[in-house]
Structure formats: C-alpha cells, structure tokens
C-alpha cells in the first residue's frame, strides 16, 4: 500500500507519501504546500487540488489518509479547512484512491500510544518511527507523515 497522507489546511497543507516495504515504513516524499493569503479563497482551493493531483500523478499512491477536523473555537477557520479538506478528498477520489480518515486522537494513539500526547511528543515519535531525510520546516509536514504512519499501522490488510 502506498499512502498519500494529508494534514489539511488552506494556508498550509502537510503532504506525505509513505509505504511499507518488507515490514519497514518508508517516507517517499513530504512537504508543506503553501498558498498565498492574498489570493481569493477559491483560487487557493484550486491550487490545493492541483498540488494533490500533481503528487498523485508523480508518486502513484493507491490510498488517501487524511486527518479529520477538530473543531476549535474559530468556526470560520474550521469551515475553510473543511472546504480545503473536501478538495483533497474529491481530487483523490476522482483519481481512484481509497479513503481512510483519522481523528487527532487516533493519530496520537497510533504514533505515541497515548491519546493526550502533545504535538511535540507526536513529532518526536514520528521522527523515531520513520527516517526523515530533511528536517521539516513546518509541523504540518510532520503531521502528514504521522497521518500516513497511522494508516500503515491501522490498515494492515489493505
């Protein structure tokens, strides 16, 4: 199984491609895709869709793993992240990828074994679970890798 993993957002989108080979989790690609805050929101959504499609075309994943939303107090931001998330799901579905969704709690448990782990603890464990060649500049990239690792651990029979 080759997994396209996404930590959704509209300003920053964490993207990773991971797979399991001979029982070892391998990071094939990761980045933090950023959109310009001066662009119209609809243009930002188009750019996100185009980037997701470019990654799918380049790395040929067969599965999309994406984080579900945790609604905090800022509903406006949550709604925009939902829309960006929908663009990623639509693009991957259109390309025939299977879909798996994971809550922040599921990801924390899969990566650290503890549902109340901090962001730093998840990041530290992610770096221990898989070789990451370059240090990610933004947490979104590490978060996407963690989403991918959660999928590889959770969906063993796919």
Image: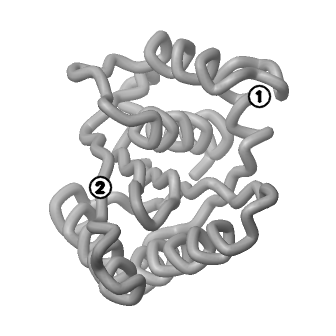
Residue wearing tag 2? 33
Disc 2: CA contacts within 10 A as few (<14), some (14-19) or many (>=20): some
Query: What is the x, y in percent for residue 62?
Result: 40, 62
Along the line of sight, which residue is nearer the eye, 4 or 115? 115
Is 134 situated above or below 12? above
- Residue 27 quadrant: top left
- Pick the residue in front: 81 or 102: 81
**Residue at which label 1 appears:** 109
At x 47%, y 54%, the residue is: 6
Image x and y of residue 132, in percent? 31, 21
Judged from this view, the residue extending furthest toward the left is 58
Helix, strand or loop status at disc 1: helix
Quadrant in the picture for residue 53: bottom left
User: Vertically, is 143 above or below 83?
Assistant: above
Q: Secondary structure at mark 2?
A: strand
Above or below residue 59? Residue 86 is below
Sequence-wise first label, 2 or 1? 2
Write the residue at 27% across / 67% down. Answer: 36
Give the x, y percent position of residue 84: 50, 74
Q: Residue at x 26, y 38 (%)?
A: 28
């Amino acid at each position: 199984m080759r997994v396209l993993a996404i930590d959704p957002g509209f300003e920053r989108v964490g993207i990773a491609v991971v797979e399991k080979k001979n029982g070892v989790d391998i990071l094939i690609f990761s980045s933090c895709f950023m959109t310009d805050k001066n662009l119209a929101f609809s243009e930002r959504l188009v750019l996100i869709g185009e980037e997701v499609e470019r990654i799918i075309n380049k790395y040929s994943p067969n599965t999309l793993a994406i984080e579900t939303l945790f609604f905090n107090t800022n509903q406006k931001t949550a709604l925009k992240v939902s829309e960006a998330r929908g663009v990623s799901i639509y693009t991957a579905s259109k390309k025939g990828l299977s879909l798996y969704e994971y809550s922040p709690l599921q990801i924390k448990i899969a990566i650290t074994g503890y549902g109340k782990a901090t962001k730093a603890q998840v990041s530290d464990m992610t770096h221990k679970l898989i070789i990451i060649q370059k240090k990610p500049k933004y947490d979104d990239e590490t978060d996407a890798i963690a989403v991918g690792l959660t999928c590889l651990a959770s969906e063993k029979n796919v």
